[in-house]
Amino acid sequence: SAPPSPPRRRRSSHAAKRPLISATDHRMRSLANFLLMVGVCVPPALYVAVLHRRCPAETPTSGESGLALARRWLAALPADASSMFAPPSSVACDVYASHPRLFVNLIYFVVVDVGFYLIYLLQGSTWLIDPHWQLIPVCISLFFFSHPDAGWDEGVPQHPRAYLVLGLLLVWATRLMHNYLRREGYQFGDREDWRYNDMRREHGRWFVISQFFAVCVAQHCMLVGLTMPLQPAMAASGASLNRFDALAASLCLTGICVGLVADNQLFAYMQSPDKPLLLDSGLWRFSRHPNHFGEQLWWIGILSSAVAAAGGWSGFVAGGPHCWAVAFGVCFNHPIDTLATLPLIEARMLRRPERATLYRAYQRRTSLLAPWFVRGGGKDAKVA
């Protein structure tokens, strides 16, 4: 007779629960990353609140250069941070009250350039900067909104433009954050931007150094630069509401709407189980990157609000170096986005051989950025 079969091994309760534990760990990790995402905003907010409450109304200015002030501010920061309930140093009040744009750059350098960089090293991922593309402009706008330059008196800014710009920015940030969260499946820290992931593989061990410049410093120039128009736009000394405010609001709202429609169409396409190889319908029929076009239009609208605060182009250009400091973000970000980021996306789209032919035809007939008439009467892709 055949030998008796060995007894069937029972699955241990530990093995049965392993997927549940893994899912629980994943949720806890996502929650921890969410708290990290929000928590990094708290220390600079507390620091600004202390300066707002404790710096004298008439803060004397030293008249030093920006570089000298930055050095003194950085030297005084450890003492200021360790004694949050003591009167802040004179240089901290000077930079905060008299040099708000310098103050924003210094805070960004300490918290994001250095602080985020250390987090990137510890976590092995640069994911944290992605949601902060929405959060940091909100934080900077609230700083300028509550700054003494905004005419903050008894808790109410004096200029209606400040309310207009802040309202537009909150709508923009909410829209963009919702798009980020649904794209990530409402998880935090699961993955980093594919461009930095590719860079991590290409740079190897040198990415430990190169990411400080490619991620931290480059993002500094973009994020802080793009938000610099918020300072004159919210200043109490700005010109009365004028036609450039209408232009700015129109550009901002158009940018938000274009980005909303483009991202909704892209999300629906990505969620479709039987999607074609190429999305070339809706807005994507007339532009290969309509979401980027919407974002660029939005930031041009924000810059236009600074032009409105100067009373028009002549007043804005008359600002000299001040004008270029405010316009730097758009002049830096938009060419890089168009000439560097979009070609990277296009190259990625051509990686799959079965899609390459379709995408090259799409490139020939469809505008790169601004929606425009289709060349040659192209048809939507139907190949699955």
Image (cartoon, rainbow, N blue to C red):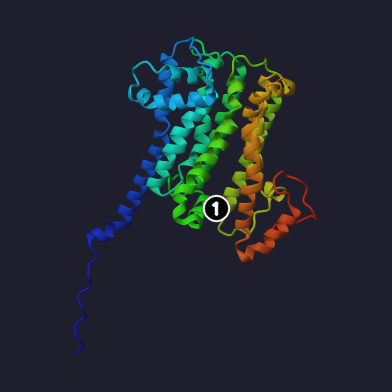
- Between 341 and 83, the residue placed more toward the observer is 83
The answer to whether 51 is drawn above or below residue 264 in the figure is above
Residue 79: give x, y in percent of width and height. 35, 24
Q: Is residue 355 above or below residue 295?
A: below
Q: Residue at x 78, y 47 (%)?
A: 373
* Residue 158 in which image quadrant: top right
- Is label 1 in a helix, a strand or a loop? helix
Q: Which residue is mark 1?
A: 271
Q: Residue at x 20, y 78 (%)?
A: 6
The answer to whether 110 appears left or right of 298 in the picture is left
Residue nearest the viewer, comparing 228 with 211: 211
Q: Quadrant of the N terminus?
A: bottom left
* Relative height, residue 206 to residue 12 (above, below): above
Q: Quadrant of the C terminus?
A: bottom right
The amino acid sitting under disc 1 is Gln
Kindly indicate the quadrant of the structure image that contains residue 101: top right
Q: Specify the farthest residue to the right.
A: 376
